[in-house]
Image (cartoon, rainbow, N blue to C red):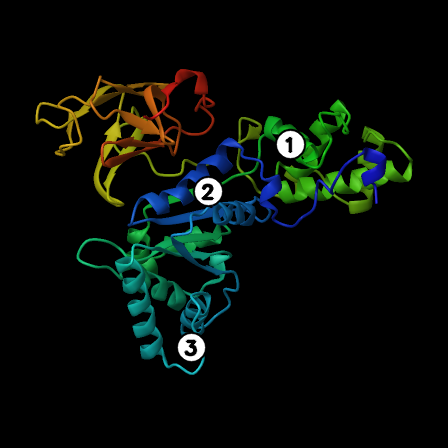
Amino acid sequence: MYLELFKLLELPFRLSPDPHFLYLSKQHARAKAYMESTIWFTDGFVVITGEIGAGKTTLIETFLRELQTDVVVAQINQTQLSPTAFLQTVLVQFGFTPFHMKKPEVLATLNEFLLDQQANGRKVMLIIDEAQNLSNRVLEEVRMLSGVETTKDKALRIILAGQPQLNDKLNSEELVQLAQRVRLRFHLAALSKSETSAYIDHRLEVAGSQGRKIFAEDTYPTIYRYTGGTPRLINTLCDTAMMAAYAKDRDTVSVEDLDAAIRELQWVEFSSGTNRMRIGGTESAAPPAVAVAGSGQTVGRILIAHEGKTTMERELKPGRVVIGRTPDNDLQIDSKFISRHHCQIVTQGDSCVIEDLNSTNGIYVQFKRVRRHNLNDGDVVQVGKHEIMYLDERTPRVRQAPDMTETEVFDKT
C-alpha cells in the first residue's frame, strides 16, 4: 500500500468506526455531550440522528470506550427483530441465555436485572444503533423498558441512534408516548467546508503525518464539493486519491490525482445528488438540537440534577440568574452544600458565563474548581451536590466556538 511513500504509520481513511481517529467538530462534540448526559441524569433518554456516514457509530464507539466500570451496557446493532427477539437480544447482552424463555419470563428477568443493578449502585445503559429500522412494536418495548423504575429513579438509560427516518417515526401519532420520554434529540449534520479540511488534516496527523501537508491546498474545496462534508464520503474520496498519487509515485496528492479519483468513483458533485436544503445559495445549517421555547430571545437552557435525577429546568435569556440556597435568589437550590448566594449565570446574545460568588464549596467543571467559566453546549458544572447542565439553544451558524481562555481554574484541594 501507500504507507511507506507517504511516511504514515497506518491507513488514515479507513471506513471502520475507529475512535482513535474521531474528529470532534462542534456538532460531533455536542452529540457526544448529549450521550454523556445519560450518565449524569437517571432519566437520560437521548436520540441522535444523522445521514448515512455522518459518524454516529464512531461517536458511539468513542463513548463506550470512555465509560467507567460501574456502567453496564447492552449495545444492539441488529435491529430487524421481532419484539420478543429484541428483548432476548438485550438479555444476551447482559449475559443471559434467554432463547427458551417466553416473553413474560424475558420481561420479568429484565426487570429483576435492572432493579438489582440499580440497588448495587451500577448504571445500566441500552444503546441501539440503526434504530430507524426498529418496528413500532419494538419501539413500544423500548418505551416500556424506559419506564422501569424505583420510587426514586429510572433503572435504564437509553441512547437511540439512527438515520433521519427515526425522527419521522418518533413524531408519528403511534409513538407519541415514547417521544414524550425522550429528554434530548440532536441531528448530526455534515461537516462545514472548514471542518472538512480540518477533518482530513486530523486523520492524517493521527496516522503519522507529523504536520506534513499530504493534500495540496487547492484539493480541499473540491473534496468538499464532491462529499458535502459527509465523513464516510471524505474517507472514500481521500483514500482513492492517495492511491492515484501512489500510482504516480507522488508523496503529495494533487488536483490531478483528485480528479482521477473522482473519475474512478464516477461521482458527481454532492449537491447534484441530494435534496439538502439550501438558503441563499449556501448550505443550510443543522437544525437546533432542541426546539427553542418561549421568545426568540432565549439563548440557552439549564437542567439542575441531584443524585442523577433532574429536579429543575430553566430557560436563559439575556440577563443575570443568581443561584443560591435562600429564597431571594432567582433560582433556589435548598441544600446545605449551597451558599446563600452561590453563583450567577450571566447571559448575553452571544455568550453565557457562570461565575462563583465566593461560595464556600465553589463550582467545578471537569473536576477542576473554577472562578469563572464560559459555558459551552453540553457543559456540566458541579455546584455542591447538584449538577447544572447547560444546553445552548442558538443555532450552530451563530454559536461561537468554545474559548477556553475564559476559564480561570485552580486545582481542587
Q: Amino acid at mark 3?
A: Pro
Residue 285 in view, yes or no: no
Residue at the spot x=40%, y=70% of the render? 87
Q: Residues within 10 Å of mark 2 (few under 14, many from 20)?
A: many
Quick one: label 3 or label 2, which is nearer the N terminus?
Answer: 3
Residue depicted at x 59% and y 29%: 195
Residue 187's tag is 2
Secondary element under disc 3, as helix, strand or loop, is loop
Point out residue 197 in the picture as x, y percentages from the top left corner: 65, 28
Residue sitting at 64 percent across and 44 percent down? 232
Nearest the viewer among 397 and 94 is 94
Task: Say which element carries label 2.
Answer: strand
Q: List x then y, in percent, for residue 96.
A: 42, 72
Say which mark, if any, is on residue 98: 3
Residue 317 position within the rendered picture, expressed as x and y whole percent measured from the top left: 26, 23
| Amino acid on which the number 2 mark rests in the picture | His
Asked whether, in this view, residue 2 is left or right of residue 390, the answer is right
Choose mark 3 or mark 2, whichever is in front: 3
Earlier-in-chain disc, 3 versus 1: 3
User: Hey, which quadrant is residue 191 in on the image?
Assistant: top right
